[in-house]
Image (cartoon, rainbow, N blue to C red):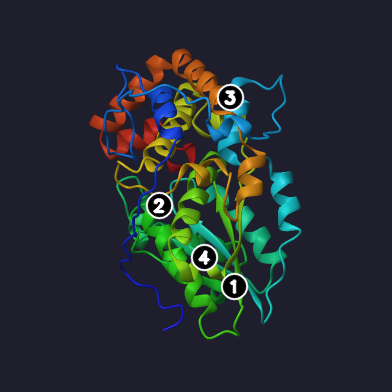
Amino acid sequence: MRHQLLERHRMPTSSRVVRWSVALFGLLSLSAIVGLVGFGHFKSLQLFGKQSNSDPASHMEGAIAENATVHEQIWRFLRLGEQAEAADILAGVEASSAQHSVVVFVSGNWYDARKVNEVVRLARMFPECTVLLTGGVGRLSDARSKELGGESLHMREMLVEAGVSPGRLRVYSGGRVTTHNAALLVHFVKETADGRPKGHRVSVLVVEESFLCRRVVATVQGMAQRDGEARAVMHRLVAVPTDTSWEGFTEVHRGSTGVAAFHVLGEMERLVQYSNPSNTPFLFTTDVALGTSGISEYQMKASGLPLSKLQSLAAHIKAQYSEDVARCHHVLRTGSQEDIQQELGPSQLT
């Protein structure tokens, strides 16, 4: 049945050789620091190669100002550029019609309250769009999400309070991690086109907290590319980041640049982990992660950086915040849920 969302939807996997993992593993591995693979799951990252001279990322055309700070350059890379750039792309997205549907997608996490304004704005910009809210209860869910039975249900509550009609919201509370939510989105896109005229297309607008955009978009795109039906239907995949700057992100985490650096480096480690076909899960290829192919190519590539530059920037941040990052890993590994949310979570959780 159309729009009947499954309580459990497992992610498909496949494998393809990825070139940047070898080099980035070298970048993101310190023998004194345990690599982060998703929140709460650890695996040692091993240095096992040197950067290839033929690395495709070296040819990327990232529009990064030479005088931008180290933090700003990595921030732009993960965030997929600025809000104004996303707005330019959104201006070219067609309104919903008999031939085209717009889906606004939210993958639940502890930054959801910061996404509400963007979702409301998109709901007004595309009055016929459907808003898909995903996310269940996980180890790091806030108290209200647990009380309601899922992060998606909490997000629904916030959006209804902000004026979005409940009839436009579709809620899936069975997912515990981003991969579950992304798999559900791919299923939902196919369901949206089912029964519509042949050639019906679906554009997906991903609302996410700034620095999480690249990985979430890469995950959705990687799954869609492995699903022939979804690949044929999905027309556009656009990241719509929150307006958080690097400085703003440190304020979100109580002014701690060390905690902010921990989250940013962890996100880069996950990009490496999930683009390595020898690891599990293998979610997307190098080309998808760096934006050199796929339906999000323009947005991903325009915010890109040469791999050698990424190596230099991330090594600088790791050296600068090594003690803070090690402390954060210790809290995440050994702390209670209350400790983790207090030390590592955004301030609105506490």
Q: CA distance from mark 1 to mark 2?
A: 25 Å
Q: Position of residue 253 (x, y in %)?
A: 49, 31
The C terminus lies in quadrant: top left
Q: Residue at x 37, y 40 (%)?
A: 276
Q: Residue 135, can we see it?
A: no
Nearest the eye: 48 or 196: 48
Q: CA distance from mark 1 to mark 4?
A: 30 Å
Q: Which mark is residue 231?
A: 4
Mark 3 or mark 1, which is nearer the start of the sequence?
A: 3
Q: Is residue 85 left or right of residue 223?
A: right
Label 2: state its secondary structure.
helix
The residue type indicated by label 3 comes to His
Q: Position of residue 183 (x, y in %)?
A: 40, 61
Which residue is the site of mark 2?
Answer: 178
Mark 4 or mark 2, which is nearer the start of the sequence?
A: 2
The residue type indicated by label 2 comes to Thr
Of circles 1 and 4, which is in front?
4
Label 4: state its secondary structure.
helix
Which residue is the site of mark 3?
Answer: 71
Q: Is residue 173 left or right of residue 236?
A: left
The residue type indicated by label 4 comes to Arg
Q: Which mark is residue 165?
A: 1
Neighbour tally class for label 2: few under 14, some 14-19, many 20 plus, Cα within 10 Å: some
Nearest the eye: 137 or 50: 50
Q: CA distance from mark 2 to mark 4?
A: 20 Å
Q: Is residue 87 left or right of residue 277?
A: right
Q: Quadrant of residue 235?
A: bottom right
Q: Quadrant of residue 211?
A: top right
Mark 3 or mark 4, which is nearer the start of the sequence?
A: 3
Tell me, yes or no, whether the two marked residues, 2 and 4, touch with CB atoms within 8 Å: no
